[in-house]
Amino acid sequence: MTTTSTLITADPGKQELFIVREFNASRELVFRAFSEADLIARWLGPRELKTRIEKHDNRTHGSWRYIHYDDAGNEYAFNGVIHEVAAPERIIRTFEFEGMPETGHVSIEFLTLETLEGNRCRATIQAIYRSVEDRDGHIVSGMERGVLDSHSRLDELLDAMN
């Protein structure tokens, strides 16, 4: 089995970042993990948090709302609009953390899935933010740890599904 790692790239002064990860699973299976509410709830977010899917209309012109929560009752909600679902290669959606002091800090995410040799898949997420400050704020919020935990949990789920 090939070792995988997550690469997060955020060039200084730009309003975008890239998250790239290779998975030891087919593109179709990875697409399902990014598309089906019951699967998303099993891997998305930091390990110490659980995920509740409040809304998941995963289709072109659909919308979503997920809530991470801990045992103490703290909740962290995120939502967005789905612009396009093109199975199994692409999902385009917006992302907004509801805990900001003001609304409107929305990014747009382009998830692209590429088939690799050996029944593997590369997932690339390009996130574009309203401003460099919004992007940098997301980075320093702990986003990297959440992404790394999520990808580790997703590896475990994909292994169980293979």
Image: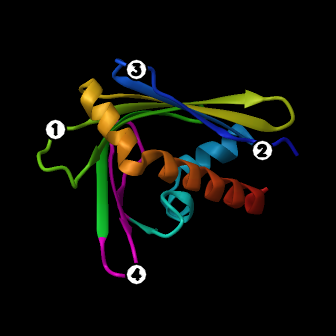
Q: Position of residue 18 (x, y in %)?
A: 50, 28
Location of mark 4 (residue): 71
| Residue occupying the point 48% across, 53% down | 146
| Residue occupying the point 21% across, 38% down | 105
State the separation of the CA atoms marked 2 and 1: 36 Å
Indicate which disc, 1 or 3, sits on the residue closer to the N terminus.
Answer: 3
Q: Does residue 72 sit above or below 22 in this rendering?
A: below
Q: Is residue 121 magenta?
A: no
| Mark 3 surroundings within 10 Å by alpha-carbon count, few (fewer than 14), some (14 through 19), many (20 or more) | few
Quarter of the figure with residue 77: bottom left
The one of 102 and 159 positioned closer to us in this rendering: 102
Quarter of the figure with residue 7: top right
Location of mark 2 (residue): 24
Location of mark 3 (residue): 12
| Marks 3, 2: nearer the viewer | 3
Mark 4 vs 3: CB contact within 8 A: no
Residue 104: image tag: 1
Mark 2 vs 1: CB contact within 8 A: no
| Mark 4 surroundings within 10 Å by alpha-carbon count, few (fewer than 14), some (14 through 19), many (20 or more) | few
Instruction: Name the amino acid type tagged 3.
Output: Pro
Disc 4 on helix, strand or loop?
A: loop
| Mark 2 surroundings within 10 Å by alpha-carbon count, few (fewer than 14), some (14 through 19), many (20 or more) | many
Classify residue 86 as left or right of residue 83: right
Indicate which disc, 4 or 3, sits on the residue closer to the N terminus.
Answer: 3
Indicate which disc, 2 or 1, sits on the residue closer to the N terminus.
Answer: 2
State the separation of the CA atoms marked 2 and 4: 32 Å
Disc 1 on helix, strand or loop?
A: loop
Q: Which residues are magenta?
A: 53-74
What is the tally of numbered marks visible in this picture?
4
| Residue occupying the point 56% across, 54% down | 150
Q: Does residue 87 sit above or below 99 in this rendering?
A: above
Disc 2 on helix, strand or loop?
A: loop
